[in-house]
Amino acid sequence: MADKIRVMISEEEVDAKIEEIGKKISEDYAGKPVHLICILKGSVFFCCELAKRITVPVSLDFMSVTSYGDGTKSSGIVKIAKDLDESLEGKEVIVIEDIIDSGRTLSYLLDVLKQRKPNSLKLCTLLDKPDRRVKEVQVDYVGFEIPDEFVVGYGLDYAQKYRNLPYIGVVEGLEED
Ligand code: IMP
Ligand code: MG
């Protein structure tokens, strides 16, 4: 049976917010190129849309980490499944995430990336669920703070489905935990 999805943040709202973050990043990094690290697979949609709205020179690299199984619960184990292709040394790096939930993935990842000597390292996330935080992480750019609900769309999946939805939605009737 098809799942029922309730819209939490509309496509128009997401687009407007990405425009706003793009503008902010372009101002903050005026005159400097930025190196965006897209965390696969969830951040792809957000990262591409954001990159299109940044007016300073942009380079991109991709990394894949796994911290979740196919369900909605964190395993607490972070593994680098695909590492970056390029060095970070001397670069103005911004890590682009889809969502920060427990913070485990990012807190681990930022430690790893810091050791690679970027000139600066910032974190940008489309969504933030502050109520769920287990590990503290400093987030520099946030799209939306959302309540503790499992969301899909704009890159976010439920068992690999719904990444392509152009809005942020909640799958109705999901049993969490
Ligand atoms: P954290 O390590 O708990 O912060 O988890 C971050 C990762 O968990 C994200 O990059 C997502 O892949 C996944 N995740 C957390 N919450 C959700 C959600 O509501 N929907 C879909 N994926 C989620
Ligand atoms: Mg995921």
Image: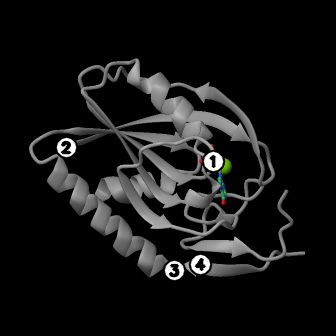
Q: Which mark is residue 102?
A: 1
Sequence-first disc among 3 and 2? 3
Measured Cα–Cα span from mark 1 to mark 3: 24 Å
Q: Is residue 9 above or below residue 160?
A: below
Measured Cα–Cα span from mark 1 to mark 2: 32 Å
Measured Cα–Cα span from mark 1 to mark 4: 20 Å
Which residue is the site of mark 2? 57
Measured Cα–Cα span from mark 2 to mark 4: 33 Å
Sequence-first disc among 1 and 3? 3
- 76 left or right of 135? right
Residue at left offset 19%, top offset 54%: 26
- Mark closer to the observer (4, 3): 4
Q: Secondary structure at mark 1?
A: loop
- Classify mark 4: residues with Cα within 10 Å, few (<14), some (14-19) or many (20+): some
Q: Secondary structure at mark 2?
A: loop
Sequence-first disc among 1 and 4? 4
Q: Secondary structure at mark 4?
A: strand
Which residue is the site of mark 4? 8
Which residue is the site of mark 3? 10
